[in-house]
Image: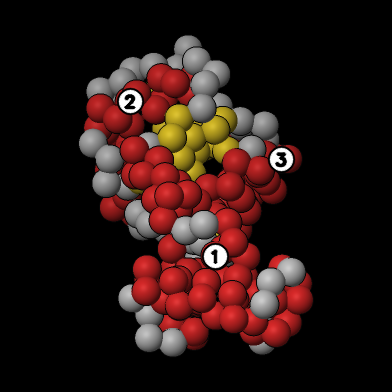
Amino acid sequence: MPYKLFLIDDHKIVRDGIKAMLLAKTEFQVVGEAASAEEATKYITRLNPDIVFVDLKLPDANGALLIKELNELVPASYILLTSDPNSVDMERAKSSGAVAFLTKDMDTQEYFKALDEVVSGRQYISSAFSNVMLNDVLKYTPREIEVLRGFADGFTYKEIGAQLDMSPRTVETHKNNLMKKMEAKSIVEMVRIAIKQGLITA
């Protein structure tokens, strides 16, 4: 009996592409699809799928957070799907119960490999997600990330220094290093880039 798949993505071309790709794998059958979180919640309990693809950016929800809600309705193997991988949403999805993290531009063979890993009870992280995580770890120091969060929360040099037990001058040094690495011209731009890269949340 084939594994039942459910697809959640607001772009029909993505859903159709996954369905067409899976025609070559008789052990998988797409039993339903949805273009929004509301639509997914409406149909998923009725179809009771084994594997669910969830797009990260839905019109009415963050897919990484939606996985938790859906998992409570139907325990299944949830796969986060995105064209813009970042470590923050990956961690959110992992906490929600996701078991695989894929990008939409992966080739067919990697999709098949991911599905094989999932049905075998193993986690799968695409190379794009792995590279993002590695870059985040290597490019910025833990202290820089803490300083970054302080600026994102609107604190002053003095306030950040007091929170992190460092002088305002040291805070400024970390800020200058961050701006250089990000090629940012202001603190506002630095914070905006950090959010886009998934280093901090908005």
In this view, the residue in front, 28 or 65, is 65
Residue located beneath label 2 in the image: 112
- Tell me the kind of residue under disc 2: Phe
**Given this view, does label 1 or label 3 mark the residue nearer the observer?**
1
Residue located beneath label 1 in the image: 144
Cα separation, mark 2 vs mark 3, equals 26 Å
Q: Identify the residue at image location x=39%, y=28%.
A: 114
- Tell me the kind of residue under disc 3: Leu
Mark found first going from the N terminus, 1 or 3 = 3
Instruction: Classify residue 72 as left or right of residue 24.
Output: right
**Given this view, does label 2 or label 3 mark the residue nearer the observer?**
2
Whether residue 34 appears in this view of the structure is no
Give SS at disc 2.
helix
Q: Identify the residue at image location x=51%, y=76%.
A: 173
Residue located beneath label 3 in the image: 73
Give SS at disc 1.
helix
Is the C terminus in the top left, top right, bottom left or bottom right quadrant? Answer: bottom right
Q: Is residue 169 above or below residue 144?
A: below
Tag 1 and tag 3, C-beta contact below 8 Å: no
Whether residue 133 appears in this view of the structure is yes
**Residue 97 percent coordinates (x, y):** 64, 38
Cα separation, mark 1 vs mark 2, equals 39 Å
Q: How is the image coloured?
A: secondary structure
In this view, the residue in front, 23 or 85, is 85
Mark found first going from the N terminus, 2 or 3 = 3
- Tell me the kind of residue under disc 1: Glu
Mark found first going from the N terminus, 1 or 2 = 2
